[in-house]
Image (cartoon, helix red, strand yellow):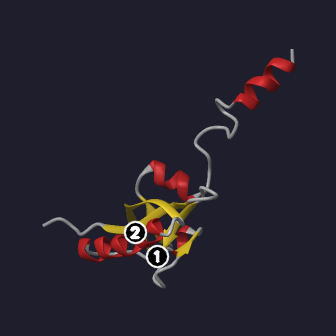
């Protein structure tokens, strides 16, 4: 018998793009540590369904479930992608590929 997978709901703010997490209070927090952990698929699916109301209100975009491990220090994302998001780190420089980066690079010659 396999162990149940703990999950959290994550999304991004529509306007700022920051990673956010669904809390026990059925609200959003930018702190990963505040995120509610769901031990069953039914609980996780129900939370994800409630989070969809914020998409309809154009407050958040792209809510989805992520797997987490839980120990005495609290929850931890299991994937590298989610560890980066939880730490609020960019996966590439902010100006990567932007016109402003190309213009500033061409003027530095």
Residue 100: x percent and y percent?
76, 31
In the shown orientation, is residue 49 left or right of residue 2? right
- 96 shown above or below 51: above
Q: Which residue is mark 2?
A: 52
Furthest residue to the right?
A: 108
Furthest residue to the left?
A: 1
Furthest residue to the bottom?
A: 25
Quarter of the image for the N terminus: give it.
bottom left
Numbered mark located on residue 46 in the image: none
Quarter of the image for the C terminus: give it.
top right
Residue 98: x percent and y percent?
68, 31
For the residue pair 55 and 106, the one nearer the viewer reads as: 55
- 21 shown above or below 18: below
Q: Which residue is mark 1?
A: 72
In the shown orientation, is residue 102 left or right of residue 63? right
Q: Earlier in the sequence, mark 1 or mark 2?
A: 2
For the residue pair 20 and 34, the one nearer the viewer reads as: 20
- 103 shown above or below 55: above
Residue 71: x percent and y percent?
42, 72
Q: Secondary structure at mark 1?
A: loop
In the shown orientation, is residue 45 left or right of residue 100? left
Q: Residue at x 39, y 64 (%)?
A: 68
Circle 1 or circle 2, nearest the eye: 2
Q: Residue at x 42, y 52 (%)?
A: 79
For the residue pair 69 and 61, the one nearer the viewer reads as: 61
Classify residue 4 by image quadrant: bottom left
Count of residue discs: 2
Q: Residue at x 67, y 38 (%)?
A: 93
In the shown orientation, is residue 65 left or right of residue 32? left
Q: Residue at x 48, y 78 (%)?
A: 23
């Amino acid at each position: 018998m396999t162990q149940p997978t703990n999950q959290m709901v994550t999304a991004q703010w529509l306007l700022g793009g920051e990673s956010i997490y669904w809390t026990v209070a059925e609200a959003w927090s930018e702190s990963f540590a505040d995120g509610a952990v769901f031990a069953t698929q039914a609980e996780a699916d129900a939370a994800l369904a409630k989070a969809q109301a914020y998409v309809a209100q154009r407050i958040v975009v792209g809510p989805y479930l992520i797997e987490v491990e839980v120990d005495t220090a609290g929850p931890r994302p299991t994937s590298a992608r989610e560890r980066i998001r939880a730490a609020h780190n960019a996966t590439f420089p902010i100006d990567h590929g932007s016109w402003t980066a190309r213009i500033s690079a061409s003027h530095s010659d």
